[in-house]
Each structure stands twice: as C-alpha cells, then as structure tokens.
Image (spheres, rainbow, N blue to C red):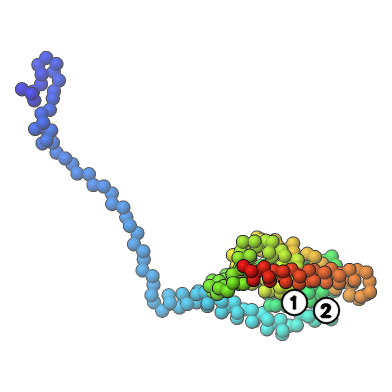
C-alpha cells in the first residue's frame, strides 16, 4: 500500500489524504498601535493662552517694552554723564563694566551711540572707554536682536511684501555677515534700526554679533578718542578722530546711493 512503511527500506511516506487532514494553527500578527492625537483644549484658559502667545500679542509686548525703555531714558537723562561725569562711588574696571551694561540698555532704548561713545571717552579715557563702549555696543545689539527675533519676527515677516523690503530682507538673510559689516562700518542706518531689521530677517546670531563687533571698532574708537580729547579741540588727536568720523559717513552716503539704484533694479 502507498501509505504503509516499505518493507525493504523502512522509509515512511505520508499519503496525500493524511497531509490534507493536518491541523492548521492560525498565527495572529501584531497589530500596530496608532497614536490618536489628543484633542486640543478648547476652554477659556487655552484660548487666552493662545491669544497671549500669538505673534501680534508678542509684538505688542515688544512695543510696550521699548516705549517703557524710551520713557525711562527721558526720565533719567543719561546725557548728563557728559556734564556731571560718572558717580564717584564707582571707579576703575567695575565702573567700566557698569557703564557697559548701562550702555547696552540705553541703545535698546534708542539713545544715540555717538553720545554714549563720547561719554565713555570723557569719563574713562581712550583705552578703558573704548573697551566699555565696544562691550556695550555688542550687548545692546544682542539684546535688541533677541527682542526683535522672539517678539517681533513672526508678526512682521508676513508684511515684507514690497519690492524694496523683500530685496533688503533677502540681502540680510543670504549675506548677513557682509551686509551687517557694511552697515556698521559705514554709518547711515541708525543702530537700533539695523538691529531690529536684522532680527526680522533670517540672519543668524553669530554673523550678526561678529559683524557688529568688528564693524563697530573704527567708529567707536573715533568717538571715544574725540570724547577723551574734547578738552583740547585743536590737538592733532582730536582732529584725526573727527576725520575718521567724517570719512566713513561720506563713504556710507555714497554706498547708500549706489545700493538704492541696485535695489530698485531688482
């Protein structure tokens, strides 16, 4: 018989009928778990939180902070440093560090940097005054850039629709280091305006701070030296510093005139 064991070899074969009657055990495959997103809270607290964190709410906070800073500057009148000098309780490096911190806060509040640089030279002299003024410049630029980036960028970027605005934003976003370096080397754009324009663009932190530090050296040094030697306005040091101030200003005006035609043609 075909399903019996062969007598000669002893090898067993299974008949087709027996193979068909074997039990089949079903194997269950693991079902992947699909994460169901949790429903967003719709209560009054959630709606209030979303409203407070919206781009325009953060921009309104930025406007309030800047207005408060400008009001405090008008109240305390930091320009009195040029006439009254630094408080006698502070001196040396400690006074320079405090001045640098105050310098940075004043630039955020729209105080002109030339006034602060002249005060640094008049109070601390050329060397220590230059260090305090440059540190305050970088600090103030970083504070303004951070405020504009976190509180104003999301609200203001959708408004960049004009041709000139788009061209300026593209220049700052793609060529941030050299664009900001040229802005700092050739004065013409106000310090605070350059800070907040860079914050609205896609420029990175490192190119912005590096260009600010390097590009502010000549202008800052010239104003500090002018402030330190203002007592003798006919001295060669004072005259050279005034020339260093005037030449970049004229070059910046010529560069701005050339860039104006270039941006219009784009």
Task: Pick whichever, 248 or 109, lies toward us.
Answer: 248
2 vs 1, front mark: 1
Q: Where is residue 68 in the image (x, y as percent from the top left)?
A: 64, 81
Quadrant of the rendered structure where residue 8 is?
top left
Of helix, strand and loop, which one carries label 1? loop
Task: Pick whichever, 33 or 151, lies toward us.
Answer: 151
Q: Is residue 32 above or below residue 79?
A: above
Q: Is residue 217 above or below residue 232?
A: above
Quadrant of the rendered structure where residue 100 is?
bottom right
Along the horizontal axis of the image, is 58 left or right of 39? right
Along the horizontal axis of the image, is 60 left or right of 24? right
Q: Which residue lies furthest to the left in this view?
A: 1
Q: Position of residue 194 (x, y in %)?
A: 67, 71
Determine the residue positioned at 69% across, 61% down. 178
Task: Pick whichever, 79 or 188, lies toward us.
Answer: 188
Q: Mark 2 Cα within 10 Å, few/some/many (few <14, many 20+)?
A: some
Residue at numbered disc 2: 82
Q: Residue 90 carries which label?
A: none
Q: Residue 112 carries which label?
A: 1
Of helix, strand and loop, which one carries label 2? helix
Q: Can residue 244 be seen in this view?
A: yes
Image quarter (top left, top right, bottom left or bottom right) of the N terminus: top left
Rounded to the nearest angstrom, the CA distance separating label 2 from label 1 is 14 Å
Q: Residue furthest top?
A: 8
Q: Position of residue 191 (x, y in %)?
A: 71, 72
Determine the residue positioned at 68% across, 64% down. 179
């Amino acid at each position: 018989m075909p399903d019996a064991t062969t007598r000669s070899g002893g090898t067993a074969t299974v008949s087709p009928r027996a193979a068909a009657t074997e039990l089949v055990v079903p194997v269950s495959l693991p079902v992947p778990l699909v994460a169901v997103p949790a429903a967003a809270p719709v209560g009054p607290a959630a709606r209030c939180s979303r409203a407070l964190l919206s781009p325009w709410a953060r921009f309104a906070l930025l406007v309030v902070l800047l207005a408060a800073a400008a009001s405090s500057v008008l109240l305390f009148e930091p320009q009195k440093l040029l006439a009254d000098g630094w408080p006698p309780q502070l001196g040396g490096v400690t006074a320079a560090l405090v001045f640098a911190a105050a310098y940075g806060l004043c630039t955020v509040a729209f105080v002109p940097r030339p006034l602060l640089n002249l005060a640094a030279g008049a109070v601390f002299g050329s060397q220590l005054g230059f260090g305090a003024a440059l540190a305050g410049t970088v600090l103030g630029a970083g504070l303004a850039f951070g405020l504009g980036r976190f509180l104003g960028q999301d609200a203001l970027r959708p408004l960049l629709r004009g041709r000139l605005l788009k061209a300026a934003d593209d220049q700052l976003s793609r060529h941030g280091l050299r664009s900001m370096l040229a802005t700092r080397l050739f004065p013409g754009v106000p310090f605070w305006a350059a800070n907040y324009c860079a914050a609205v663009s896609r420029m990175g932190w490192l190119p912005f701070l590096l260009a600010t530090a390097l590009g502010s050296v000549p202008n800052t040094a010239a104003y500090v030296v002018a402030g330190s030697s203002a007592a003798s306005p006919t001295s060669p040091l004072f005259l050279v510093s005034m020339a260093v101030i005037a030449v970049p200003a004229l070059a910046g005006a010529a560069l701005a005139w050339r860039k104006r035609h270039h941006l219009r043609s784009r």
